[in-house]
Amino acid sequence: MSPSSLDRTVKWCRRRPSGGYVEVVDALDRFAELAARPDPPLDEALALVAAHGRRDVRVGELVAALDALAAELGGHLGGAVDAGSLCSTLFGPGGFRGDGEDYHDPRNSLLDQVFERRLGIPITLSVLAMEVGRRLGVELVGIGMPGHFLVRDTHDADAFHDPFHGGAPLDAAGCRSLFERLHGSRARFEAGML
């Protein structure tokens, strides 16, 4: 292995469930391990992407930051946490938002930078909503609608939210309208895209 590739090797630490010592793991190896699972932990996977992109990122600290954000949001919302209140608070005024000015900035894909800048792209903001929601008992699923990533409430098949646009609530017709704005009215929308 050349010195330059050694420099790019990112390591992170985790505590063993049996307690005691800390193990050093290669971020790429750990990501591959997670990606092979049928239902990988999105919080850790997204933190590993950031750790691969930036040497000083600590995976455990990013996962803990998600825990803290969920606790803060849960305290703010009290017992009335649902998909709508979660998304409107997380992505409303003063919250996280979509980077419409520099969408392709690589920082929009790195969880540590999303936290620091409070800016992201649809998929990173959606994963943020899904993971904060999971911690608060709000079940959201990611929807890879062509051209734009959304989240859907698992308890309501017609309740979507757009984290990139302030957590805006959408129904299937609203999703179709968004799709047509992105792709033009001639683009063929199908319900299966949701």
Image (cartoon, rainbow, N blue to C red):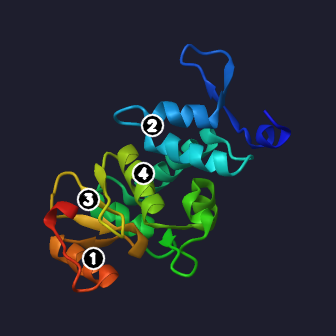
Residue 81 vertical placement versus 18 (above, below): below
Q: Where does residue 156 sit, x and y in percent of width and height?
A: 16, 57
**Camera-nearest label, 3 or 1:** 1
Residue 107 vertical placement versus 43 (above, below): below
Measure how far apart labels 4 and 2 are at the Cα level: 20 Å
The numbered disc on residue 152 is: 3
Dot 3 alpha-carbon crowd within 10 angstroms: few under 14, some 14 to 19, many 20 or more: many
Which of the pair 56/166 is nearer the observer?
56
Label 4's element? helix
Camera sees residue 132: yes
Quarter of the image with the C terminus is: bottom left
Residue picked out by circle 1 = 179
User: Which numbered disc flags the more N-terminal residue, 3 or 4?
Assistant: 4
Kind of residue at badge 2: Ala
Kind of residue at badge 3: Arg
Residue picked out by circle 2 = 35
Label 2's element? helix
Q: In this view, does 82 lie to the left or right of 117?
A: left
Label 3's element? strand
Q: Do labels 1 and 2 touch, CB within 8 Å?
A: no
Kind of residue at badge 1: Phe
Question: Which residue appears at 65% of the width and 45% of the height?
Answer: 51
Question: Which residue appears at 23% of the width and 79% of the height?
Answer: 187
**Camera-nearest label, 4 or 1:** 1
Q: Where does residue 162 sit, x and y in percent of width and height?
A: 34, 69
Measure how far apart labels 3 and 4 are at the Cα level: 14 Å
Residue picked out by circle 4 = 132
Which quadrant of the view contains residue 101? bottom right
